[in-house]
Image (tube, rainbow, N blue to C red):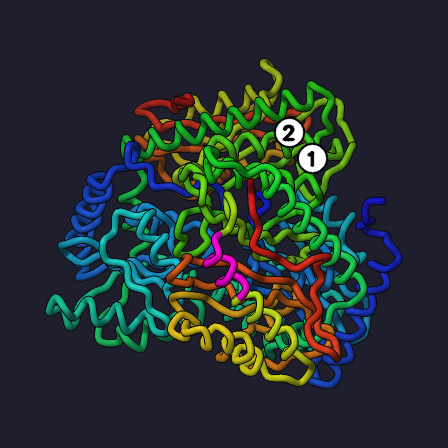
Amino acid sequence: MAPDFSADHPMRVACYAARAEKVRDAMRAAGHELLIAYGNGRHSFVGMNPAWYLSGFKQMGPHTAVILPLDGDPFVVVTPRWDDERAKERSAIKEVIAVEPDQFVATIVGEIEKRQLGRARAAVAGGQQQPRELLESWPGALGQEVADADQIISDLSRIRDAWSLHCTRAAVDIAERGYDWLLANARPGMKEHHVAGELETYIRALGAEDNFQLMSSSQHNRSVHMPTNRVIAEGDILLGEITPAVEGEYIQICRTAVFGRPSALQLEKFAMLDEALRAGMKAAKPGVPVSEVVAAINAPISAAGYEKYTVPPYMRTRGHSMSLGSMDPEIATFSGHVIAKGVVFVMHPNQYIPDTGYFMCGEPVIITDDGAQPLTSRMGELGSIL
Amino acid sequence: MISMIPVLERGYTFWDRSMLPSDEFEERTRTAQAMMAQEDLDALLVWSQSYHSNGDLAWLSGWPMAGGLVVRRDGEPTMFSPGGGRELYFQRMQTWLNDIRSVPGSVGKGIAALISENGVSHGRIGVIGRHLMSKGGLRDLDEHLGGYTLVEAGDAYSAMRAAKRPREILAARAALVIAEAAVQAGQDAYDGGASNAEAMVAAERVARLHGARDWRCLANLTGRGLRPFERLGSERQERLRLWVAVDQSGYWAHSSTPGAAAGTANRALDAMIACAGAGARGGDVAEAGLAVLGAEDKEAALSYGLGSGIGLDLEEAPAIVPGSAAVLVKGGLLALRVVTSGALDLATAMVEIGGDTGRRIVAS
């Protein structure tokens, strides 16, 4: 039976209500009386959308905001006006006001005043995608200094609730089926972008509303990238970063497959990355700084003589969150993050190896007391397309 | 038209040298340098964000990379790309630029060093895309370019780009081929019994196989208005109303299922096209279309929007809205549309601004 994502799903209703209450608890602790949770229509895989996290509505217009008072009912302002019906259907917040983009801020200010909330101490959670001009305009618009509430949303959302996990698991299933499709259908002689296009639409048909997908193939890859006009050849190494989204919950698998039988050298190097991934998963326990997870991942790679290649430009990061609510954790030494129980992220020692080219090896994981557990039904292997 | 922006432009990515050869970009650079001389600018900085297109930067670079592109009074531009450099190899495949520098950390420092390399230690730097910069990015720029006068150059740059170059029209027509093929595929799927949502997926598939780098689509999924795809459904409406937009080699085109031949939407669209000549204002074109519509359809058409310029961005100047004083420039490209109440009728056109009137461009 296909998973249920209807707006009135009891779990969905309960979780969104619980999110609002937890945010209110955090607001109380921080001294905020009114929260504006903003969302930008330039959807980003690496930027949170606080409005979407609290409303359950994926916006199409440039601006959306959930206005959550400490006392009183929340409301959501969406753009553009003609999207109001869809917003009313999907929003977990009952009161939806749809306006044109140029009326967005004025509408929020007007509604705040109408509800006599103008004196409430305000905070804004804008996420990384909030335009700078808008960010700087809130104090003037609200007539007060405005606190930054990004951390409130980030801290709450990084621990996935039941609805988030329901959607996440559906996305994992789509990703795995997408990769199975790739193994079954990609063949030498096909163009890279044809394969990527077919994969993309297959994933759409499985129910993913979006997909951060990179797919490329070459005899010696320098990195994974968008598909080009390259013709796939025997012996090519196919790289796939497949990241479908269900209700905003992205999940990523990183896979490598050879068109033909992998050589002993390729198997050896993939095994090295797999060992690195498993070491990272074992190290990623609650309370552990991500720098230690990075060290655990890099250890077998460095021991094999590839220490030079464990930093940019040969790789990007050892893993990252993909939540619409939080960018924590980023599995990189600069992040300063600490692993927490219940967080979900992708751990991936993807990197360039001079002997074989770039390889991808990564799993979406959830943190338990025993370390990171994969959300996939089976971890990636070096695939063979015969 | 406002549509669902995807998390990544992830379709066919390839520098088509046959359509946009290096000399095209060399000529664009010379044009930009002529504009700089006119505006008394010692350098030009064009900024773009990650993951989403920015036409201003792509116009010179050939591909929308994140970061800052610097044009000096002579010579080729230099691209400063933030990040660790993993993408550099691929970026070089997509652009005619020889000088691409990966700058983890401060982009401003690199830009300042480049400009002063030419002995330009003070002067005016035109900035485009300042509004796209984060607080940190702007601070970095102000810190390292404090010795220069940073001036907003967006208007001059837009004016320079307003009339499309011949190869830009060619690229737009190529995108239109894909858009029309996608619409046809959607219609064929629907005629074959597919639901409206399934028809959207069929349209997307064809667009991607034909080489779309980015894809937008709205359809009458519920029979009331247009919606983006969110999940597959079996609901089938009385007819299919599909609006699509395709980016191919950076250039956008839109198309739709045809409206009723003598219907309100097409009549309003024809009226706008007839008005879309050089010298007309965006507001005039809008009013010409609205004059054909009844009250309810007028409201719907205004809410969905009547159109705008189109090119390297899906929506560019001029805006086709009542009251717009933007003057149409000969050779500019417009994406015009009329959506009536409940999206019961829908008509679109790609239009080149002519001397007296607009001219529909045809796919090639």
User: Does residue B232 appear in this view?
Assistant: yes
The residue at which mark 1 appears reads as B225
Residue that extends furthest to the front in the rendered view of this protein: A264
Q: Residue at x 78, y 32 (%)?
A: B234
Tally the marks: 2
Residue A313 spot, x, y in % from top left: 38, 66
Disc 2 or 1, which lies upstream in sequence?
Answer: 1
Tell me the CA gap for discs 2 and 1. 9 Å
Q: Residue furthest left?
A: B119
Q: Nearer the viewer, mark 2 or mark 1?
A: 1
Q: Is residue B200 magenta?
A: no
Q: Main secondary structure of the magenta part?
A: helix
Image point (21%, 48%), residue name: B29
Q: Secondary structure at mark 1?
A: loop
Reading the image, the residue beneath label 2 is B340
Q: From the top left corner, tell me how far across and down residue B133 is, in percent.
A: 41, 65
Q: In this rendering, would A73 be left or right of A138?
A: right
Residue type indicated by callout 2: Thr
Kind of residue indicated by mark 1: Gly
Q: Is residue A84 left or right of residue B50?
A: right
Quadrant location of residue A117?
bottom right
Q: Secondary structure at mark 2?
A: loop
Say which of B233 and A66 sits in front: B233
Where residue A293 appears, as percent x and y from the top left, is 57, 78
Q: Quadrant of the N terminus of chain B?
A: top right
Q: Position of residue B170 (x, y in %)?
A: 33, 29
Residues in magenta?
A: A263-271
Q: Give a yes or no on whether discs 2 and 1 share a subunit.
A: yes
